[in-house]
Image (cartoon, helix red, strand yellow):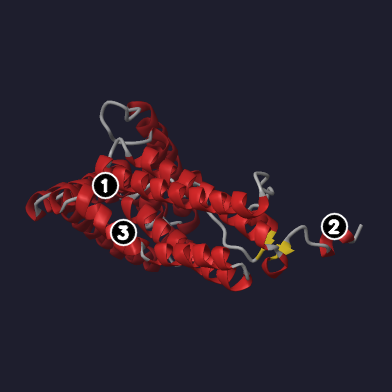
């Protein structure tokens, strides 16, 4: 029974034979090529030039695999042992492409650089462990090839991704991020911050009871978040508009709507009415100016129009709530 906990089903790298080292290198090159092709497939629609870079990198990994298989046939025959990285203790992991999605350009470029560095370290260690001259020579060559992949990537970018094309892809990625996350999140934050002002402060001034105000504000914020989230999901599937996944947009909208309302609700956990109310008013001012800055920064809305839409609108809603609560 205890063997399940104390006996590992992995081998130490140092215990591998030269045939097993070659088999591990072959399976690793196959995995890397498959991952690069998956990156290319995921980027092809939105970033076709970057997709070509990963296709070429996959092709190069395929060449490495071919050289390793030829050496294995020469030394050990046609039967390659089934050994993979998960069978070796301490061997570097590879994240499948579905774990790093969505495939942002910076994310996959960074992931590829990490993969090449890990492969280089593996080949250096593998070469030190082997005594056969041909095997050591090939593993050493592959270590040098992996270390030179950074320069190779630069060459591929120059070939497939000139400066204007790269700028175009970076702009497209930024636009997609804004459409999928920033715009829905900003709409939710504005709705949560502004639309909840009237019921919260009306309740506050009508009852002057902080706990009742907190419960009403909590209900208004959570309810608004759920409503806005489902509305965003149902409003557009993102296929024609290009705004991205409706689930992601709905979550961004719903969460930010709730956060926008809770910002000036939480102070009412303070028992003293005027202390809670003054803090809530300060938070409202900060929220409105934060929304104004976000509109100007990401949506390129002129300061004057952003102030008119957010600050003036929020002030009017707050005033309406206060007047109704004092009626």
For marks 3 and 1, the one nearer the N-term is 3
Q: Report how far apart the C-alphas of labels 3 and 1 lie in the structure.
A: 24 Å
Viewer-proximal residue among 305 and 116: 116
Query: Which mark, by number, is residue 4?
Result: 2
Eye-nearest disc, 3 or 1: 3
Viewer-proximal residue among 234 and 130: 130
Q: Position of residue 65 (x, y in %)?
A: 50, 50
Q: Position of residue 155 (x, y in %)?
A: 25, 57
Q: Report how far apart the C-alphas of labels 3 and 2 lie in the structure.
A: 45 Å
Task: Name the residue rendered at 33%, 36% in the picture.
Answer: 244
For marks 2 and 1, the one nearer the N-term is 2
Quadrant for the N terminus in the image = bottom right
Eye-nearest disc, 2 or 1: 2
For the residue carrying disc 1, how many other residues have a C-alpha within 10 Å: few (<14), some (14-19), or many (20+)?
Answer: some
The residue tagged 1 is: 173
For marks 3 and 2, the one nearer the N-term is 2
Q: Report how far apart the C-alphas of labels 2 and 1 lie in the structure.
A: 47 Å
Viewer-proximal residue among 254 and 319: 254
The residue tagged 3 is: 152
């Amino acid at each position: 029974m205890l063997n399940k906990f104390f006996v590992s089903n992995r081998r130490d790298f140092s215990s591998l034979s030269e045939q097993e080292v070659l088999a591990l290198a072959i399976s690793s090159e196959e995995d890397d090529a498959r991952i690069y092709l998956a990156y290319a497939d995921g980027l092809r629609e939105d970033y076709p030039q970057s997709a070509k870079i990963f296709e070429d990198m996959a092709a190069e990994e395929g060449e490495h695999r071919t050289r390793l298989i030829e050496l294995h046939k020469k030394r050990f025959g046609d039967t390659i042992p089934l050994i993979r990285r998960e069978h070796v203790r301490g061997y570097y992991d590879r994240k499948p492409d579905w774990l790093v999605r969505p495939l942002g350009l910076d994310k996959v470029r960074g992931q590829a650089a990490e993969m090449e560095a890990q492969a280089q370290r593996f080949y250096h260690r593998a070469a030190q462990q082997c005594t056969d001259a041909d095997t050591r020579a090939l593993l050493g060559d592959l270590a040098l090839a992996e270390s030179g992949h950074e320069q190779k990537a630069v060459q591929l970018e120059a070939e497939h991704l000139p400066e204007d094309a790269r700028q175009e892809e970076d702009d497209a990625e930024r636009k997609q991020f804004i459409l999928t996350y920033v715009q829905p999140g900003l709409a939710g934050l504005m709705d949560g911050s502004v639309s909840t002002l009237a019921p919260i402060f009306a309740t506050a001034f009508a009852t002057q009871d902080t706990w009742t105000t907190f419960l009403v504000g909590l209900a208004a914020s959570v309810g608004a978040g759920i409503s806005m989230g489902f509305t965003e999901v149902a409003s557009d599937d993102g296929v024609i508009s290009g705004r991205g996944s409706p689930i992601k947009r709905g979550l961004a909208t719903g969460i930010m709507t709730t956060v926008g309302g809770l910002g000036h609700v939480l102070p009412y956990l303070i028992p003293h009415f005027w202390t809670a109310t003054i803090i809530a008013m300060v938070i409202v001012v900060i929220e409105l100016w934060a929304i104004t800055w976000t509109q100007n920064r990401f949506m390129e809305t002129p300061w004057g129009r952003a102030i008119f839409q957010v600050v003036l609108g929020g002030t009017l809603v707050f005033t309406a709530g206060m007047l109704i609560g004092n009626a």
